[in-house]
Amino acid sequence: MEKGKDLSIQEVISTNQGFYQALQNDVREIVAGEKEKMRRRHFVLPLAYSDFRELFMSFGNICLLNRNQEKGFVIDEDNESIIKQLYCYATNNTAFAGDLNKGILLQGKYGCGKTLLLETYSLLHNHIVKKYSLNQPLLLFIKSVELQEHIIKQSASAFAKRPLIIDEFGRESKTVMDYGNVSRPISELLSLRSDVGTLIHGTTNFTLATLSSDEFYGGMIGDRLKAMFNFITLKGESRRV
C-alpha cells in the first residue's frame, strides 16, 4: 500500500475549494457545543418565586436544626433581596443582577447570615438532584480552611472541576509550608478553576479590594476573581444571639 502523502497547506487549499467555508462551519459547531456546555452547567429550577421562597424557608429550617438551633428561618428586608437573586440564578432568569455564567460570592459582616443562605441553597439543590436522580453534580459546601487541608493532602486538581461553595473564603492561611516549600493551595485552585471555567460560589467577610491585596491573593488572582464571581452584598448586622 502506498504510503500517504503529507500535503502542504497550499496543496490542501488548492484541492479544497470550500476550505474557508469548511473552517467556518467547524467554528460554528465548536461554538454551539461550548454554549451547550455552559447551558448545562446551570441547574434550572421550574419554580415560581412564591414556591421557591417557601421551599427555601423550609430547607433553611433544616439547616438550623442541623446546627442544633430550634429558632425558625426568618426572611426579612435584609435577606429577601438576596433570596430573590438566588431564585433568579437558580431559574436562569435574566432579572438576575449579574452574569449568569459566573458564580456568586456573597459578602457581608460577620454573622449576618451569608453562610446560612448558601448552605440552604446547596441543601435544596442537592436534595432535588438526589430525590429525582438527576444527571447533575452535587454542590460541595465546604469551609475554606477545610478545603485547603484537603488540597494539601490530595491536590488542587482534585477540586478543579467539582462544583464548590467555599464558606468563609479568605479566612484560611494564604501560604503553607509543604516539605520545606511555600505553597498557596487556594490560590492554585482558583487559578485552575479560572482556566477551566468551572462555576464556584462562596461567602466572605472581605471586599474584592482586600482579597486582591498582597496580604491575601494578590492582584493577579484578584483580577481572576472578577471574572469568576458576581459580588453580592448581604446587608444587616449579626443575627447571632
Image (tube, rainbow, N blue to C red):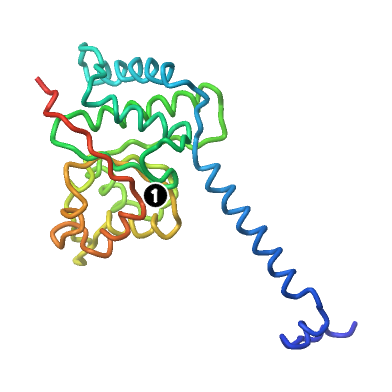
Residue at x-position 20% and y-position 15%:
69
The residue sitting at 38% across, 26% down in the picture is 123
Image location of residue 59, percent across then percent down? 35, 19
Q: Which residue lies under the disc numbered 1?
A: 159
Query: Is 138 left, or right, of 228 in this rendering?
Result: right
Q: Quadrant of residue 112?
A: top left
Disc tally is 1
The N terminus - image quarter: bottom right
Residue type at numbered disc 1:
Phe
Classify residue 96 as left or right of residue 167. right
Q: Residues within 10 Å of mark 1 (few under 14, many from 20)?
A: some
Q: What residue is rendered at 13% in x and 59% in y?
A: 215
Q: Residue furthest left?
A: 241
Q: Quadrant of residue 117?
A: top left
Q: Nearer the viewer, residue 236 or 196?
A: 236
75 and 70: which is toward the camera: 75
Q: Residue at x 43, y 43 (%)?
A: 100
- Which residue, as the protein is rendered here, is positioned at the far front? 95
Q: Residue reaching furthest right? A: 1
Give above or below for 156 relative to 135: below
Residue 187 position (above or below residue 40): below
Q: Is 115 or 89 nearer to us in this picture?
A: 89
Instruction: Find residue 213 and report its horizontal and vertical position in percent.
Output: 16, 60
Closer to us: 46 or 191: 46
Q: Quadrant of the C terminus?
A: top left
Helix or strand or loop: what does disc 1 sit on? helix
Give the percent coordinates (x, y) of residue 175.
Answer: 18, 59
